Image (spheres, rainbow, N blue to C red):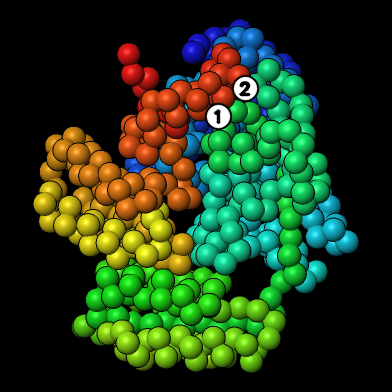
Amino acid sequence: MKHLTPTHVLYFQNNFPNACFLDKDVLENYGHDETENLQFTPELLIKPSNTLEVSNILCYCNEQQIPVTPCGARTGLSGGALAIHGGILLSMERFNKILHIDENNLQVTVEPGVITQELQNTVKNKGLFYPPDPASKGSCFIGGNIAENSGGPKAVKYGVTANYVINLEFVLPNGAIIWTGANVLKNATGYNLTQLVVGSEGTLGIVTKIVLRLIPHPTKDILMLVPFSSATEACRLVPEIFKQGITPSAMEFMERDALLWTLQFVDDSPVRVADHHQAHLLIELDGWDEQSLFSDCEKIYQILESFDCDEPLIADTQAQKDALWTLRRKVGEAVKSHSIYKEEDTVVPRYELSNLLSGVKEIGAKYGFKSVCYGHAGDGNLHINIIKGELSDHFWNTELKTAIREIFELTVKLGGTISGEHGIGYVQKEYMDIPFNEIQLNLMRSIKNIFDPNGIMNPGKVFPEQLS
C-alpha cells in the first residue's frame, strides 16, 4: 500500500474539487467510529456525489495502489470504517436519496447514505415496512447496514439486512460498474453476487445503489417487560416461547446493570428494578389481528408460570412503548459512558443462550473482569460488554485477549460464531481462526483477490495474518 504523494492529492483536488477535504480537524473527526477508543486518521477524505465519481476515484487508486476505506455514518463497533493504512477515506454521506418506491412490487431503490430510520418512516407512510432496525437506526446508513449485514431486534421474526437486499449497483476496485442481480424475488441465475457483497465489510468494492424488498407494515403490537430473579432463567425462557408456536417480533435481553445504567440516562421511566431483579426480557408481538396477539400473550403468561419471574409490565400506551424501546436502544450508550469497555458480538443457537451467559460469567471470574450483557435473545445474539473498571492497562491491552479467545471458543463450541451483526472489521480479525480453518479462510482470501487483486479495498480488515 502506498501513502499519498502531493501528486496524488493534486490529482484528486483537480478532478473532484468540491469533494476533497484535507483539514486536520476534519480528518481526525473521520478517524474514528464507535469502536472503543480507536483512532486512525486518513490522509485524505473524499465525499463523492455520484457513481461515476466513485468509479473514477477507484480506478485511479487501483492504478496507483492507494488504499481506500469506505465509510458511512461511522456507527460501527468493529473498526470496519477506520483507515488503518491511511490513504483515502471515501465517505458515502452525499448518496442520501430515496430514489423510487415501487408500491406495486413492494420494493424501494435507495442510495447507501440514506439513514435507516428515515427510510423506515418514509415507507411506513405508505403502509410498508423495512424491518432491519439496528440500535443506531436513527443515525446509521443503509450502506453500512449492508456492509455489516446488520440485524437488530426485529431480526428474530423478520430476518436481517441480507433478507431484504434484492439487487445492488456496485463499483469494483478497478472502477467497473455492475449490477449484482435482478429486481426479482427469485433468481437461480449463476452465483449470487448480491449476497456475496452483503456482509463483505467494504472489502470487495463500493455499493452505490440498493434495491430492497418491503413488506406490509403490521398495524397492531403488544409490548411487555418481564423481570427475572436470575439472568440464566430469563435466557432459559426464550426457546420455550418458540416451542409453543409463538414468534415474537422482538425478544430483547437486558442484564441488571445494563438496565440500571441506562435508567440514569432517561427521565420518568415506567420501569422500576427491584433488588432481586437480575435480568429483564422485552417481548414484542406484532401483526394485524388483535385477538390473535392477545391469544399469544395469554400463552406467554401461561409459560411464565413455570419460571422464576415477577409480573410483566404491559405497555398500555404508545408513549410507554416508546419509553421501553428507548431504554433498550440506549443500553450501549449507557455502558460506553460508564466505563472503558470492549464489546463482543456473540451468537449461538437460542437454546444455548443460557449456557453461553453462564460460561461468560465463569470466564470473567477466572480472569477477574466484570461483564454486562444484553442483546437479541430471540435469535441467540448476546452482546458481551467487558468493563475495564479498575483493571490494569497491561491486563487490558495484553492478557484480556486470552479471555476473549476463551469466550469465542465457548461460543463456537456451543454451535455459534463470533459475530452476529457487528462484523469482524479490524478488532476481531485475529480471532477468525476460531470459527474457520485455514482452508476456509484461504477460500475467502481468494474471493477477495479476484475482486481486488491489488488489495486496495479496506485493507487490513476481516482476515487475520496468513499462516506461513
Instruction: Between residue 94 and residue 200, name the one nearer to us.
Output: 200
Residue plotted at (38% across, 45% down): 418
| Dot label at residue 361 | none
Look at mark 2 in the image and give the residue it sits on.
Answer: 451
Q: Position of residue 445 (x, y in %)?
A: 49, 23
Q: Position of residue 426 (x, y in %)?
A: 41, 34
Q: Is residue 459 left or right of residue 90?
A: left
- Residue 397 can be seen, yes or no: yes
Q: How far apart are labels 2 and 1 at the CA level?
A: 9 Å
Which quadrant of the view contains residue 301? Answer: bottom left
Amino acid type of disc 2?
Phe
Cβ atoms at labels 2 and 1 below 8 Å apart: yes
Q: Tell me the element at label 2.
A: helix
Q: Position of residue 245 (x, y in %)?
A: 53, 77
| Dot label at residue 203 | 1
Amino acid type of disc 1?
Thr
Q: Position of residue 41 (x, y in %)?
A: 45, 29
Q: How many marks?
A: 2
Which quadrant of the view contains residue 159? Answer: bottom right
Q: Is residue 134 left or right of residue 180?
A: left
Residue plotted at (30% across, 65% down): 354
Q: Tell me the element at label 1.
A: loop
Q: Is residue 211 above or below residue 330?
A: above
Instruction: Between residue 6 and residue 168, name the one nearer to us.
Output: 168
